[in-house]
Image (cartoon, rainbow, N blue to C red):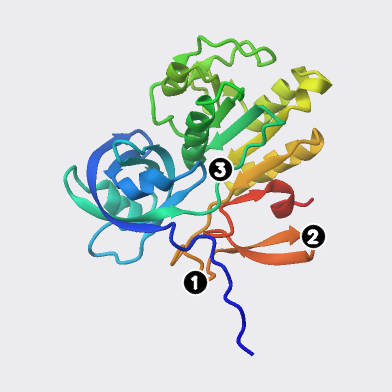
Amino acid sequence: MTQPAVSKPHRGTIFVEDAQILSQHAHLGDQHILRVQAPQCAAHAQPGSFAHITCGPELPMRRPLSIMRVDAQSGWVEFLYKAVGQGTHLLAQRKVGEHISVMGPIGKPFQAHRERPRTLLMGGGVGIPPMVFLAEHLKADKHWQPLVLMGSEVPFPFKTQPSRILVPGLPDGAIAAMPLLEDWGVPSRLASLQGYPGCFDGYITELARAWLNSLSEAQRNEVELFACGPHPMLAATAKLAREFDLPCQVSLEEFMACAVGGCAGCTVRVETEQGPAMKRVCVDGPVFEARQVFPD
């Protein structure tokens, strides 16, 4: 008997584009912000999506980069990345006007639930881009009340500024913010262990705990957490969500080969209602419910 075809939810939604580099800006800590012209990716990307891009003609294997911003009307896509290996170092050498191959958008995005309008967005290091994308998406609807917390142990890839937006419940000395979010009217605060001026001296999970403790029970029942960053930070965020009995979505970062589910090289163990299962970060994620990935 012929088996029925299995639906591929990502089929027909991933595009390969010859994308021109529009800008490439270097920041301290070997961090770079890259903007490319990729109209199909820009038109279909959602917060939490990523793209698989070529870094140089001498390196055929692509690299996955989280999407930080898109402009569907103008057709550009923006990435923040840190040059840490051969691929990203090659990418950092690419110049405005050159072309790179961009495959995207890929992956399951974040899904905010309207019954929880107090959205707490937490980004660590190169986990910052999806939080910026999600914040921009949420600010378009006045229903949402986003608060963005960012942590970094290298200088932030933007010039910080004292926030003009009051956030009750946060420590008085934590006043550093991201200018872009300030311009959008989205409150943000920064955390670091490096003593950067205006930043909270500690982890963003500690900063989040201070804010959550300041809320009433009714207010906490309106909170949903979203996070992207290093594995220890995500584990700590999942623990924080359990502590306050809050829903939490995390975006995982894994090494990838194909990024479209064929090689299964980016699988992670996930707890499901049917028991443990191995899921592909590229197409089954990168966004998962925190309790599925960090059950303890």
Position of residue 107 measured from the top left corner of the image (x, y, whole percent): 51, 54
User: Which residue corresponds to the image point at 52% horizontal and 25% vertical from the top-left?
Assistant: 139
Query: Which residue occupies the extreme left position in the image?
Result: 97
Residue, disc 2: 273
Q: Write down the residue under mark 3.
A: 229
Q: Amino acid at mark 2?
A: Glu
Q: Residue 1: which quarter of the image?
A: bottom right
- Asked which secondary structure carries label 2, the reply is loop
The residue that appears at 57% across and 68% down in the rendered structure is 7
Q: CA distance from mark 3 to mark 1?
A: 25 Å
User: Would you say 108 lies left or right of 80 here?
Assistant: right
Depth order, front residue of 7/37: 7
Place of residue 32 in the rendered image (x, y in percent of width and height, measured from the top left): 34, 39
For label 2, the crowd category at 10 Å Cα-Cα, with few meaning under 14, some 14 to 19 and many 20 or more, is few
Which badge, 1 or 2, comes first in the chain's sequence? 1
Q: Amino acid at mark 3?
A: Gly
